[in-house]
Structures are given as C-alpha cells and as structure tokens.
Amino acid sequence: MAIRNWQGGFITATEITPTGPLETGSASGVWTLAEAAAYTEQGIWPTAGNLPPDRGIIGGGQDDITGAQNIIQYITISSTGNAIDFGDLTVRRRDLGALSSATRGVFAGGYGDPNPVNTIDYITIASTGDAIDFGDLTVIASGTSACSNSTRGIIFLGITNDTSNSDIIEFVTIASAANSTDFGDLTNSQRTSQGLSSSTRAVRCGGFSNVMDYVTISSTGNATDFGDLPRSAYYLSSGNCTSGTRGIISSISGASASNEINYITIASTGNSVDFGDATTTLNNNPASCSNTTRGIIAGSAPNSSNIIQYVTIASTGNAIDFGDLTSAIYYSSGLSDCHGALS
Amino acid sequence: MSNPNIVAVTSILGKADTLTPANTTANVLLANAASSNTVLKINQIVAANVDGTNAIDTTVAINSAAAGSGTSFPICSTVSVPADASLIVVDKTTGIYLEEDKSITVQSSTASKIAYSISYEIISSS
C-alpha cells in the first residue's frame, strides 16, 4: 500500500513522518489504517508498549558465605524497584569489568574461585538468559574495569597473572565475539579503577593512585593524562556511569570506605569535582551503571550489601535509596543498554 | 424482523455518537437492537488519542449480537494510535452496514485516553 503523506499534513500544514517506533514517538495527524500498516512495516509507527531501553545489569561479585558468584541481576533504571534475577555468568567471579552496547553486555576478566581468569562472556541485555562465551583477554586479569561506546569496549586489565598491577588496555568489538586486542598503555599501573566514557573518549579513574587518564576509543593509542581524583583510591565503583557528558565516580575509597561521590566532565581534562554523598559509605567495587540521566550504585555498602542507590547525574545532589539487590554482594560490576556513551 | 430494503426506505437519519471509554475493556460504541427495523450505515469511525505523550492501542470490532454480545470480529486489533493523533478506522470507502442485533465495540489499552467518534445513517423502512 502506497503511503500518502498528505494525510497527516492535512491538519498540521506540514508533512508529518512518524518518529516511532517507541511508544513516545511523534506522529500527530490523522492517519488511515493503511498508513499505520505501511509505517509499521517501515518500523517507524509509534507503538504502545514499545518502551526505550532502560535496563541496568549487575553481574558477578562475592558474598560473605559462598565466595565468588555467577549471578546476574537486572533493574529498570528509571524505576526504584528491586533487582530481578537474570541468567548466570559462564564463570563465577568477582573484580570483573563490564561494558555494553544497547543490546549486548560484556563481562571481562575477574577473580574466580580459586584463581583469576581471562574469561570474556556476554549477555543479550533484553533477555534474561545465561552469559555466553565471547573470547579471552590476552592475559589472566582481575581488578579489571571497563567502559565503551556503542561499538567498541575498552578494558583496563588490572592485576595480570595474579602478580602485579598493570598499565595494559585492551579492546573488543562488542558485536563480534572474539579475543580482546591490545590497545595502547595507561600512564601508570592500576587495578580496581573505574572506567567512564563518552561516545568518543574513555577515562580511567584511579586504582591505587589519584591518576585519571583517557584514550580516544576509536584509536589504539596510549593514554593521556586527565585531571586527578581528590586522593589516591582503589576499589572504586565498577561500571560506566555516564550521561555521555558527565561521568559519576563513587566508592572513592581504599583502606577505608567513603560516601564521597565525584563527577568528571568527560570532554575536559579537569579534576574530579565533588558531587553529593552516597546514602552509605562505599568500598569494594560497588556495581555502577546508568541511563543518560540517572546513575546507579549497587552493593558494597561498604561490604556485602543489597543496597541500591541512585543519583541524578545532572545534579550534584545526594544519592537516594533505590530497591534492593536479590542478595547481598560486593566486588560486582554494572552495565546498561542506555548509558550516555551510546549516542 | 428483517433488515429494510434500502431501495424502499422511509427515512435516512444522519447521526453521530462519541465515546471515551473510562476502562480498558470492550465498550459498546453503537448497537443495532434486534427487531429495530433499521440498518445502520457506518460512514466513519475515528479513534483520537488525547494523550500527549504515549501511543495507545485500540481495538474496534463488530459483535455478532447487540449490546456487545456474541462473537467479536475485529476491524482493527490492538493497533497503536500515536500520541495526539487520530486513526480513521472506517471511512466512506470502507463503510459498514450494521444489521439488526449486531453492535460495534471499542477497546483502548489505557482508560480515558482514546476518544471514539462514529458517524452513521439510520436507514428505516417503517
């Protein structure tokens, strides 16, 4: 059936093309069933129940009873509801890195029971299925952190071969399951840092120093110095908590827990700036993720905990209580299908 | 009684009705009662989404008995009407004769958000 575009324009004086297919898509005008069918076929007819991506994932971690976990759980970021069980990781582990596109979440490295691993596995975020093997890191690594844009994931390896901190960066093409590939190097060695990104720039924050540095995601070049954290920190939040413009750093801790939250302007090279406070002190790698407006911090409050809290990224306000994780964990990692580096 | 012979009618009365269902179940938009001695010619049914943000599904059906009873035969089933948009479900090119003891029902996926209007003719032979 041919589309007659004048039908929508008949009452608006301007030709209308639907902006769907999300439920909130615009298509003001008067339409026939034939036009609705044609635009549905084109995938641009606004459709009830077709909601924008809004899922946060918390994967892996450790509890105080059974050690490293293979559990994955998910939340609806714009809600304040409890986490719900997802499938399982292919390998039980904590201290892992996590990154994501709008459809696929990738977990890299980590410390299993009883040894660290070079495992990379992935999930389909919209499902609730088990993780599937993706490939391997070039070396065994734990205390990894990660971030991404919509196509490339950047992994800051952390402790390699269970011996020492490293300056190694590797990357994966998220849509293609394969081994990771060497990138340039960080400006210093680290572990348990936090990775934050825009669509073009990936920033590594801390990890046994106050150093932040960045790489251009599309390159494979060495990192360049960014500003500094307020102090040397490790066991930071694990996950890309970003609006695309602003990145949220939490669990700025180490030997002692902290409720301090900072933010960076990713396009700058400035120091991190004080944000509000977390609802609890944090330590031991809380999982973190976000959509473009809300940042999530889950678990590790400061040890094994089921607490989830959120911040409004554009504000500098204090964190607010969210629902609860399915169980108390720490050393987990977060990702989402809607973070700000995807656009 | 049977439907009137439309080449020998005694009256054709133009009429329009409206309904905004306040629930998400099927509601009778128009019914032609048994033994009414009339046939209703449906010229237009429009579903207007008055919500300014979200698309809402509509289902419009012919029912095999009056007052929404009998079996439901959708003309359109869970078709989304975009925010601030109207969907022409029936127009003169796809007109329907609604015979005695049949009805038209409408259902929206969100209460009070789709306004239905129907324009029709009451064709009578007595």
Image (tube, coloured by chain):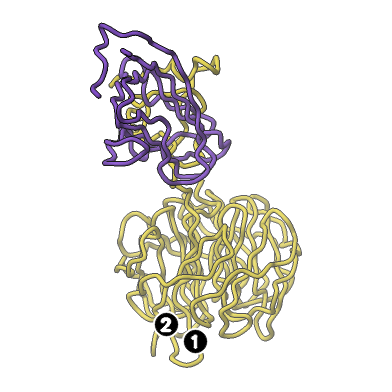
Q: Quadrant of residue B29?
A: top left
Q: Quadrant of residue A152?
A: bottom left
Chain letter for the purple colouring in the rendering: B
| Residue at the extreme bottom | A65
Quarter of the rendering occupied by the N terminus of chain A: top left
Q: Residues within 10 Å of mark 1 (few under 14, many from 20)?
A: many
Residue beneath disc 1: A63
Q: Are marks 1 and 2 in one subunit?
A: yes
Q: Is residue A9 above or below residue B100?
A: above
- Label 1 resides on the chain identified as A
- The mark found on residue A69 in the picture is 2
Q: Is residue A295 above or below residue A141?
A: above
Nearer to us in this view, A200 or A6 = A6
| Residue A312 appears in view | yes
Query: How far from the left and from the top, in percent, is residue B63?
Result: 30, 36
Nearer to us in this view, B21 or A184 = B21
Query: How far from the left and from the top, in percent, is residue B75?
Result: 31, 32
| Residue A41 appears in view | no
Query: How far from the left and from the top, in percent, is residue A69?
Result: 42, 82
Q: Residues within 10 Å of mark 2 (few under 14, many from 20)?
A: many
Chain letter for the yellow colouring in the rendering: A
User: How much space separates mark 1 and mark 2, taking CA atoms?
Assistant: 7 Å
**The disc labelled 2 sits on which kind of residue?**
Gln
In the structure shown, which secondary structural element does the residue marked by tag 1 occupy?
strand
Q: Image check: B89 left or right of A281? A: left
Which residue shows up at 49% across the image and 87% down it?
A63
**The disc labelled 1 sits on which kind of residue?**
Asp
Which residue shows up at 74% across the image and 59% down it?
A316
Nearer to us in this view, A307 or B95 = B95
Q: How many marks?
A: 2
